[in-house]
Amino acid sequence: MEIVRAAVYLSLCLSLLTSLCQGQRSPDTLFGLTDKELAALLDEDDSSVSLSVEKKASVIPRCDVGERCAMKHGPRIGRLCDCLRGTACNTFFLRCY
């Protein structure tokens, strides 16, 4: 019985303390930032985001069967075009087969 009474008093004290502390928090801040700082973050132009969108929008041309689809530069292989459906770029011959 004593444990239940202590739990009730503890929950009552915590709820009272929580309601009192709600008034201490500033309503114009969010995560420690004021409205002006949040607006500055939203207005800031981030060039890296626009670059990633441009990269995704680029289109790789299609290659026919037998056309050169890649180029070897040292140990690396760079793609020149994308092979048609049902074919793949052979990394030895560097052509669509």
Image (cartoon, rainbow, N blue to C red):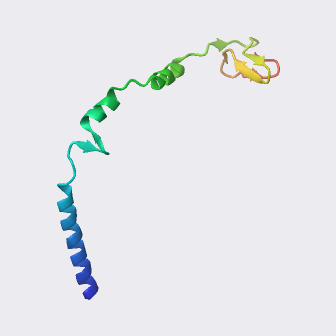
Decide: is 8 above or below 81.
Answer: below
Pick whichever, 23 or 68, lies toward us: 23
When asked about the image quadrant of residue 32, the answer is top left
Rendered location of residue 79, percent (x, y): 69, 18
Q: Is residue 11 visible?
A: yes
Indicate left or right for 70 with 55 as reference. right
Q: Residue at x 26, y 78 (%)?
A: 7
Decide: is 89 above or below 27.
Answer: above
Rendered location of residue 76, percent (x, y): 75, 23
Decide: is 29 above or below 63.
Answer: below
Q: Residue furthest bottom?
A: 1
When asked about the image quadrant of residue 8, the answer is bottom left
Rendered location of residue 40, percent (x, y): 31, 29
Give the quadrant of the N terminus. Answer: bottom left
Pick whichever, 4 or 6, lies toward us: 6
Q: Is residue 96 visible?
A: no
Decide: is 69 above or below 3.
Answer: above
When asked about the image quadrant of residue 97, the answer is top right
Pick whichever, 60 or 2, lies toward us: 2
Q: Residue at x 48, y 22 (%)?
A: 53
Q: Residue at x 62, y 13 (%)?
A: 61
Indicate left or right for 87 with 48 as reference. right
Q: Residue at x 18, y 67 (%)?
A: 16
Pick whichever, 68 or 46, lies toward us: 46
